[in-house]
Image (spheres, rainbow, N blue to C red):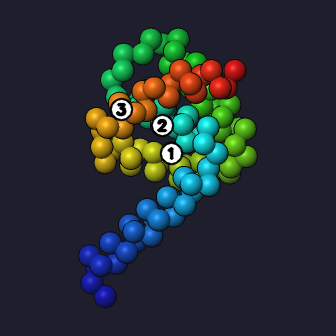
């Protein structure tokens, strides 16, 4: 079998598995991860207090989700891949999730 074909099939399998995980993950966690990636990668100019509050909110949301660490890691990777696929679109859409995530986790 061709190495490029094997690599393509592996990536397709991982993407499919990630899409299924994202669909089964709690919506609050998906939103929190979008906010976290946006805060880390989108140059939003957040003040340190807001960054800290968001970090705490993401952790509380992870704990409430009941997902194991492998599922959390996979969802985080999928969220980062979504950013990598469309930086500007992701940042525009996800920036609005920051305040919502902090408010939901209180």
Res. 54 visible in picture: no
Mark 3 element type: helix
Label of residue 46 in the image: none
Q: Foreground: 51 or 30?
A: 30
Q: CA distance from mark 3 to mark 2?
A: 9 Å
Mark 2 element type: helix
Q: Are marks 3 and 2 in contact (CB under 8 Å)?
A: no
Question: Would you identify the image quadrant in which residue 62 lies?
Answer: top right
Q: CA distance from mark 1 to mark 3?
A: 15 Å
Circle 2 or circle 1, nearest the eye: 2
Quarter of the picture holding the C terminus: top right
Q: Residue at x 73, y 46 (%)?
A: 66
Crowding at dot 2, Cα within 10 Å, few <14 / some 14-19 / many 20+, comes out as many
Crowding at dot 1, Cα within 10 Å, few <14 / some 14-19 / many 20+, comes out as many
Q: Foreground: 19 or 66?
A: 19
Image height of 103 relative to 11, above or below: above
- Residue 21 appears at what percent x and percent y? 57, 57
Q: Residue at x 35, y 30 (%)?
A: 92
- Residue 1 appears at what percent x and percent y? 31, 88
Crowding at dot 3, Cα within 10 Å, few <14 / some 14-19 / many 20+, comes out as many
Label of residue 76 in the image: 1
Mark 1 element type: helix
Sequence-wise, the earlier of marks 1 and 3 is: 1
Q: Foreground: 25 or 3?
A: 25
Q: CA distance from mark 2 to mark 1?
A: 9 Å
Label of residue 34 in the image: 2
Q: Residue at x 45, y 26 (%)?
A: 96
Label of residue 91 in the image: 3
Left or right position of 1 against 100? left
């Amino acid at each position: 079998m061709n190495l490029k074909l094997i690599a393509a099939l592996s990536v397709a399998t991982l993407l499919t598995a990630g899409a299924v995980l994202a669909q089964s993950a709690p919506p609050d966690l998906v939103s929190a991860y979008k906010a976290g990636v946006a805060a880390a990668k989108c140059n939003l100019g957040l003040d340190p207090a807001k960054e800290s509050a968001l970090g705490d909110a993401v952790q509380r949301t992870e704990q409430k989700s009941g997902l194991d660490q492998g599922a959390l890691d996979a969802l985080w990777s999928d969220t980062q891949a979504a950013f990598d696929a469309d930086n500007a679109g992701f940042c525009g859409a996800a920036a609005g999730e920051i305040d919502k995530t902090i408010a939901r986790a209180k």
